[in-house]
Image (cartoon, rainbow, N blue to C red):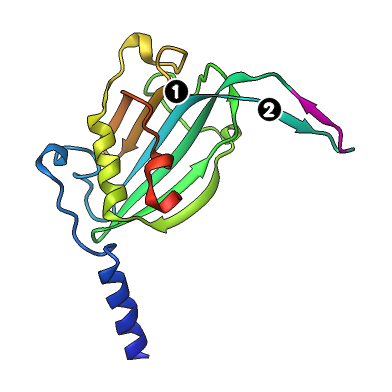
């Protein structure tokens, strides 16, 4: 049994998940870089995409709509456990645009947002640094940017402890497309 435990910890150490992450100078003041052991941050990322919804009735009939803009919200919970970062990724069903979920910083998650746990895993150094870098590709919202609409399509809210910020992402950076853990 001891040999099995040793092999498990050796593999975990060599895989890069248990190594202390050293943040470059430009990322040291990001929220994830300041995350203490046993603390967590919740990220809600909302973006607009064109899609066509299709409904299937109980009898099997398919009803298709036209292509429309929809907002999609993803939820990420990142937990620092002794320099190992765990990711819990949740997806939400699409809702019609514009998304009113992100109105101001009085965000209170509602059950009808239908978040579903998709993945619960340790994340690599690359993924942790990706989250930190995302903050550097963003700016604080103004009063005209509170809601996700056709002018500001990519937004993120970061919550945890004393952290509460709503940011506009400059560009089309989506966490779920850049995480090794979600590929």
Q: Is residue 162 above or below residue 70?
A: below
Q: Position of residue 56 (x, y in %)?
A: 80, 35
Q: Which numbered disc flags the more N-terminal residue, 2 or 1?
A: 2
Residue drawn at point x = 24 percent, y = 37 percent: 133
Nearest the camera: 177 or 31? 177
Chief secondary structure of the magenta portion? strand
Q: Residues within 10 Å of mark 1 (few under 14, many from 20)?
A: many
- For disc 1, the marked residue is 102
Q: Secondary structure at mark 1?
A: loop
Labels in figure, total: 2
Does 19 sit left or right of 77 as displayed?
A: left
- 180 part of magenta stretch: no
Nearest the camera: 16 or 32? 16
Q: Is residue 74 above or below residue 166?
A: below
Residue drawn at point x = 55 percent, y = 36 percent: 92
**Residue stretch in magenta:** 60-64
Q: Position of residue 24 (x, y in %)?
A: 13, 44
Residue placed farthest to the top in the image?
A: 144
Nearest the camera: 160 or 138? 138
Residue drawn at point x = 52 percent, y = 20 percent: 99
The quadrant of the image that shows the N terminus is: bottom left
Q: Residues within 10 Å of mark 2 (few under 14, many from 20)?
A: few
Q: Position of residue 137 (x, y in %)?
A: 26, 28
**Label 2 vs label 1, nearer the camera:** 2
Residue placed farthest to the left in the image?
A: 25
Q: Indicate the quadrant where residue 105 lies.
A: top left
- Give the label on residue 32, or none: none
Q: What is the spatial separation of the Cα atoms under label 2 and label 1, in whole angstroms?
A: 22 Å
Q: Position of residue 50 (x, y in %)?
A: 56, 23
Q: Secondary structure at mark 2?
A: loop
- For disc 2, the marked residue is 53
């Amino acid at each position: 049994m001891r040999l099995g435990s040793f092999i498990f910890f050796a593999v975990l150490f060599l895989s890069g998940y248990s190594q202390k992450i050293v943040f470059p100078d430009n990322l040291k003041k990001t929220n994830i870089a300041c995350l203490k052991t046993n603390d967590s941050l919740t990220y809600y990322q909302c973006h607009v995409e064109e899609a066509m919804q299709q409904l299937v009735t109980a009898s099997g009939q398919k009803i298709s709509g036209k292509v429309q803009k929809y907002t999609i919200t993803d939820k990420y919970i990142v937990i620092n456990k002794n320099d190992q970062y765990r990711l819990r990724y949740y997806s939400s069903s699409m809702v019609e645009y514009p998304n009113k979920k992100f109105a101001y910083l009085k965000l209170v998650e509602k059950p009808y947002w239908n978040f579903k746990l998709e993945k619960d895993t340790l994340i690599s150094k690359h993924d942790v640094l990706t989250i930190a870098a995302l903050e550097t590709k963003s700016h604080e919202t103004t009063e005209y940017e509170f809601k996700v609409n056709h002018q500001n399509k990519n937004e993120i809210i970061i919550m945890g402890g004393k952290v509460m910020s709503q940011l506009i992402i400059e560009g089309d950076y989506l966490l779920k497309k850049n995480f090794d853990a979600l590929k």
